[in-house]
Each structure stands twice: as structure tokens, then as C-alpha cells.
Image (cartoon, helix red, strand yellow):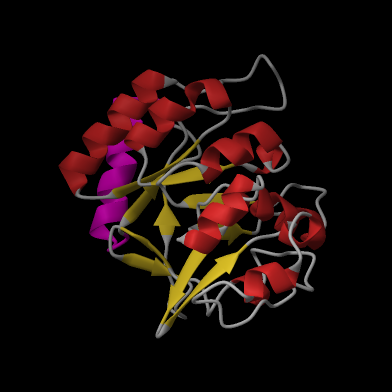
Amino acid sequence: RAVAELLEAHGIRPQVLEAAGSVSLVAPHASQVLKPDRLETLPGVRRVVPITSPFKLSSLDGSPGRTVVEVRGERFGDGGLVLVAGPCGVESREQLFTTARHVAEAGVKLLRAGAFKPRTSPYSFQGLGEEGLRLLDEARREFGLGIVTEATEVETFDAVEACADMVQLGARNMQNFALLRRAGRSPKPVLLKRGPGATLEEWLYAAEYVLGEGNRNVVLCERGI
């Protein structure tokens, strides 16, 4: 706690990682304001380790082991296969409930559908908005499914967060940095889709924005490019 308070006093917000027998504080940029020997002399500090990876939080340098993200009992990252199924967008109660029924009967536990839909054309269907979120919440209770749905802007993030079991950040928003930071302050797991023209490095840097705000539950989702 004393180490964390010292870092915070210098404008550095550390990430706390707990493993068997130890606690690590991951603090990118700390060396810019504090010399390592000042930290090493503090009680409870075993050693100060420089982070060499450019992906300071998404790499194994910043994690004691493989990340496993749990969403309503489904575990991403532990080697098993998790299916998330559903329509692209919520278009009506009948469409959503028909699809949700098939998803549940197939044994899939997570339903994906967008209430807010960013489209290439401004004249295309943009989703039902908060009415779509209400229908998703109703489908969750009716069929016992976890909800994965997309947040498209900071202004409506609170409403999406209240409904979703996992918040999706779509490909078009992979580099919406304000939205990434807001997702990083959410207690909900994040499904981060790769942008259609994004390199792997750009994708991981996008994940760093989320991780840097404290949300460690990030799942990377590949898409057609």
C-alpha cells in the first residue's frame, strides 16, 4: 500500500496483480519520475523489474500468467472453446427471441446482438438503441443467456454497461481512445474487435488503453480484414 501511495503521489496509477505468494505492482512510466533504488529500499519490495515489452500490460511481462476471463461461467483463455452466437443487431422482439431460443437450445450460453449499430452508410438501420437493450435484458431472463452487446460511444456507455454481461468494442471503434478508456473503467469484461485495417501491434496498443485504466478482463476478437 505504501508503494502504491508513493507512485500515486507522483501521478502513476499502478495495476495490482496478485499471484501465489506475491503481489506485483505494474507501473508503466514510473522510472520517469522515481529512481528504482528509491523503490527498492521500501519495506516489502523484493525487486524492481524493468518492463521491456512495448505492450506493458497485455504482454506476459505485465501478467503473472495466462489471462482467463469469465463471463457467466464461460471461461475465455483457459484452452476450451467458448461460443457466442446471435444476430448482428436487435431488429425486433420476435427476431431476437426466435434467435435466442435457437441459441439456448443449441447449448450456447452467451447471446450476442447489437442495440447500437454503427453502419458504413448513415441511412442504414442503426439499431433500436435503449429499446434494444431492454429486449436483450428480457431475453437474458427468458432464456438464461449472458448478453454480449456493443458500446459505440461514451455517451451511451452507461446504459450498455448496465445491460451487458460483456461489453463489445467493435472494429470501427478499435481506436476510439475515449471509448477504450471508458471501457477500462468498467467492471464488465470487454470484447475488443480488431479493426479492418489494423496491424497486430495497433490492436494490442488498443488493448493497452483498456488495461491501463484498470480493467484486466479483455478478450481479443479477430474479424475479417
Residue, far top: 123
Is 38 rendered above or below residue 184? Answer: below
Q: Which residues are magenta?
A: 90-108
Residue at 49 percent of width and 69 percent of height: 17
Residue 225, visible in the rendered structure: no
Does the magenta segment cover residue 103?
Answer: yes
**Residue 204, image x, y percentages:** 72, 59
Residue 121, visible in the rendered structure: yes
Residue at 64 percent of width and 61 percent of height: 27
Residue at 82 percent of width and 57 percent of height: 199
Q: Quadrant of residue 224?
A: bottom right
**Residue 119, image x, y percentages:** 65, 27
In depth, the one of 39 and 133 nearer the eye is 39
**Residue 45, image x, y percentages:** 55, 77
In depth, the one of 38 and 11 nearer the eye is 38
Q: Is residue 80 left or right of residue 50?
A: left
Is 81 rendered above or below residue 149? Answer: below
Residue at 34 percent of width and 33 percent of height: 162
Magenta stretch, overall SS: helix
Q: Quadrant of residue 200?
A: bottom right
Q: How many marks?
A: 0
In depth, the one of 50 and 199 nearer the eye is 50
Is 212 rendered above or below residue 46? Answer: above
Question: Which quadrant is home to the N terminus?
Answer: bottom left
Does the magenta segment cover residue 133?
Answer: no
**Residue 89, image x, y percentages:** 48, 33
